[in-house]
Image (tube, rainbow, N blue to C red):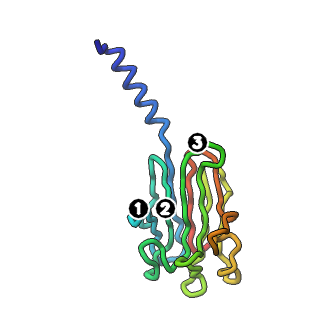
Amino acid sequence: MFSFAKALTTLLAVAFIGVQAERHVVHFDNRCQRGTPTLVRRGQILSRGWDYVTDGVLDATIAYLQTGNCGLNGEGCTTVELTLKNPNCPGCGSSVDISMISPYVYVLAWNGVSTGFGYYNGCDGAGANCKSFGNGPNCNTAFHGSNDNWVQVQCQNNDVNLAVTFCM
């Protein structure tokens, strides 16, 4: 027999599991006075400037400022590549980087967009940026080749969020 007590216990267990769900926010700070912050995952636009909230892993995702010069997945622009997830083993948490590997490029010189990111709600202060007119293509905090893994900024905190800033 399925009693009221069993039903209540099951309901409370499901509610507790729901409270424990993974959650991440991607926030945009567009200081450029133009363009549209864009968040894309596997060819699908998730956000055009508003905060994007997910109740689960956010992997293989790209953020960039659409100025009219970028392809759907950020081709032709500097991108922030991100995976936000709660770690389930040492080193298996969130990872974010700035990419300037072709087809992504540093666009500051021709359209004035500098790009940066930072974690918050965990790993506060960890992040990277490419903002100086003098360091654009030589920005040492961005991927320029497929072996530049040291530029990835990792976070091993649960429910970490990310702020992406343009024109710092």
**Is disc 1 in contact with disc 3, using a CB cutoff of under 8 Å?**
no
> Which one is closest to the eye, mark 2 or mark 1?
2
What separation in Å lies between label 1 and label 3 (alpha carbons)?
A: 25 Å
Residue at 54%, 84% in the rendered image: 111
10 Å neighbourhood of mark 2: few (<14), some, or many (≥20)?
many
Which callout, 3 or 2, points to the residue nearer the camera? 3
Q: Which residue is mark 2?
A: 61
Q: x, y (%) of residue 75?
A: 48, 77
Mark 2 / mark 1, whichever is N-terminal: 1
Name the secondary structure under disc 1.
strand
**Is the residue 103 above or below the residue 50 in the image?**
below
Residue identified by numbered label 1: 46
Q: Residue at x 54, y 49 (%)?
A: 85
At mark 3, the secondary structure is loop
Mark 1 or 3, closer to the camera: 3
Q: Are marks 2 and 1 in contact (CB under 8 Å)?
A: yes
What's the mark number on residue 100? none
